[in-house]
Structure formats: structure tokens, C-alpha cells
Amino acid sequence: MVKTGEILSKLTAQGYRITPQRIMILDAVENADDHISAEEIFTLVCLQYPNVNISTVYRTLELLKQLELVTETDFGDGRVRYHSIKKGHHHHLVCQKCGGIIDMEESIFTPLRESLLKQYGFDADIHHLAIFGTCKKCR
Amino acid sequence: MVKTGEILSKLTAQGYRITPQRIMILDAVENADDHISAEEIFTLVCLQYPNVNISTVYRTLELLKQLELVTETDFGDGRVRYHSIKKGHHHHLVCQKCGGIIDMEESIFTPLRESLLKQYGFDADIHHLAIFGTCKKCR
DNA sequence: TATGCAACTGCAATCCCTTGCATCTATGAT
DNA sequence: ATCATAGATGCAAGGGATTGCAGTTGCATA
């Protein structure tokens, strides 16, 4: 379990600064019940500090993504959503008929990653993937 | 091998109309050497018929995608690219270090699709996927 | 061949996200 | 505690893609 304090020291360790905006954005992602969009984070942070700019939110999320503190998932609804790695790695099956989302274990990609490594020498970086298709009910 | 004529009759069979714009857009995708972007298609069509609108290009591509005549791939460079299914299904490994793209066989996803079906009853619709990671040279 | 209408297009506005730039500030050094 | 500066922010403009709407057009029918 990574604590917010540890995350902040990870920032300074790499030469990045800790700013009020970053703390608030990080808090919003950490405390979100589910995958949260940039717009939603922006709205939450605005309640505390109305001067934040949406571009700061995007830039901070980009940074947290690079540092592997949050993951980004595109559920295909026109806006990307973010998730704290504290809550674990997982992937999603998105049904194109009913819109339902099934969470799946990360381990399901292990055979694929192995065969990509063996056949192509490629080290796949599959973080938080949404796969589209048709769920059991809708087939 | 699907011919353009067949494609057009597939449109009419489903109640869609054949318009000059659609023919030109389809031609652009069919004759493209590689994966082509909406903007590139737009530019090509404009040479013949300067009045086309970029939104018609996007709407036509959306339609062709639904009819499974073209596939859409996001190579992560900020614009989506399109490809005729006539040229076969395949997937891509995109190296995040050198930017290189390796094409891979569709069959590499067969085991994954089978386990998704078995474990989750989910029929995955993996058309034209780009997987990010690190290639052999850059590791 | 002429007609009616649903499908389609062009236009403009809008959405999500990114970027360049001038200003500000967190932080290490003094 | 103060200073210098590289890193961060806010603002505004811009890029790719989508959407609502009014006007146009392909095409089935007569």
C-alpha cells in the first residue's frame, strides 16, 4: 500500500515539485470511488481552489502516469479516465451492446505478454486496457 | 478480395446511400499505401471535390467502421488512422522509445480471445489493436 | 420522367485535450 | 531569512473529432 506521503516524496526524489495543485489533484484521484475523468477531478479541485486550470490537471495526470502512480483507461465514451495504482492493476471488458463493464484480472494477459516477448522480442506495457466486445448476456 | 463495387452494394443493401463523397472517401482508403488519417483522406478528396467537409469524412469513416469495411487504429500520436479490411487484419506493436511499429499476426490474440470467452463469456472484438511497449532493439 | 422523403451534407458550434508563452513559486544554496 | 532559478501554473489559442440543424440529394415509387 503506497501512502500519499510516499507518493509526494517520489516526486521530489525525481526533481519535481510539490505544489498545492498537485496535492489536490492527487487527493482527488486517490479518494475517487471509481475511475475518474479529468473534468471530474477539475470540478472537485475547484471546490477547494477555484483558480486551478484544467491544463494543470491534464499536465499533472500526465506526470503521475509517467511516474506510474496512476493509470489511464479509455472506455470509448469520448473521455479518458484515471485510476490510482494503489487500487491495483486490472483491465476491463466493455460491452458494446449494453455498455456494461466487467473487471478482469491482470494475469489474463500473461500468456500474451510472454508470446510477444518470445516471438517479437517486444516488452509489452499493458497497463490498464479496455477491450471491447459483447458480454455473456448480450450474445 | 472485396471489390469496391461489392462494398457499394453492401451500403445500399443496408439502406445507406451511395454519394459522390462516400465513393471518393472509400477510394482514398482503398488506395492508400498505409494506414491513413482522416485529415489525409480529406486532403485527397479535396483535390477532386473541394467542397467536402471534414465532418463528412469522419461520418463516412464511422459508417465504414460499423459495416466492418475499414478498421481504426490509434497509434498514440494524437490522430487515429484507418485501414481497409481488404488489406487484411493485423495488429501493431508500437515502441515507446524509438517509435518503431512492428506488424503482427492476428492469430496471436487467439488464446486471449479464447480465455476471455471461457472465463468471462465475453466475445472480444479485437480488430486492429496497437500495443505499446519496448521493442527488441530498445530494451 | 417526375415526385416525396428519408438519408446525407455543409456549416458552425462545441467537446476533449494539448501547447506556447509570460508569469509565478517551490526549493536548494547562500 | 533571503535569493536565484528551474520547474510549475494560468491563460489563451489551437488541434482532432463530434454534433445539431437547416438545407440538399439519392433513390424508391408511381
Image (cartoon, coloured by chain):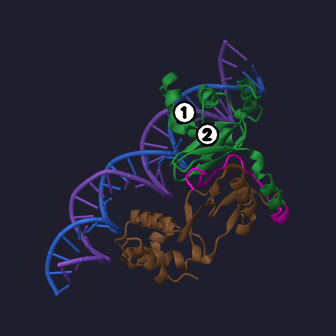
Chain colours: A green, B brown, C blue, D purple
Residue annotated with mark 2: A82
Residue at image position (53%, 78%) is B30
Q: Which mark is residue B114?
A: none
The chain carrying label 1 is A
User: Going from the N terminus, do you reach mark 1 or mark 2 first?
Assistant: 1
- Relative placement, left or right, of A111 versus B5 is right
Along the line of sight, the residue nearer the viewer: A133 or A63? A133
- The kind of residue tagged 1 is Ile
Residue B87 on image: x %, y %: 61, 77
The chain carrying label 2 is A
Residue at image position (72%, 41%) is A89
| Circles 1, 2 touching at the beta carbon (< 8 Å) | yes
Q: Which residues are magenta?
A: A118-139
- The kind of residue tagged 2 is Tyr
Tell me the CA gap for discs 1 and 2.
9 Å
Residue annotated with mark 1: A41
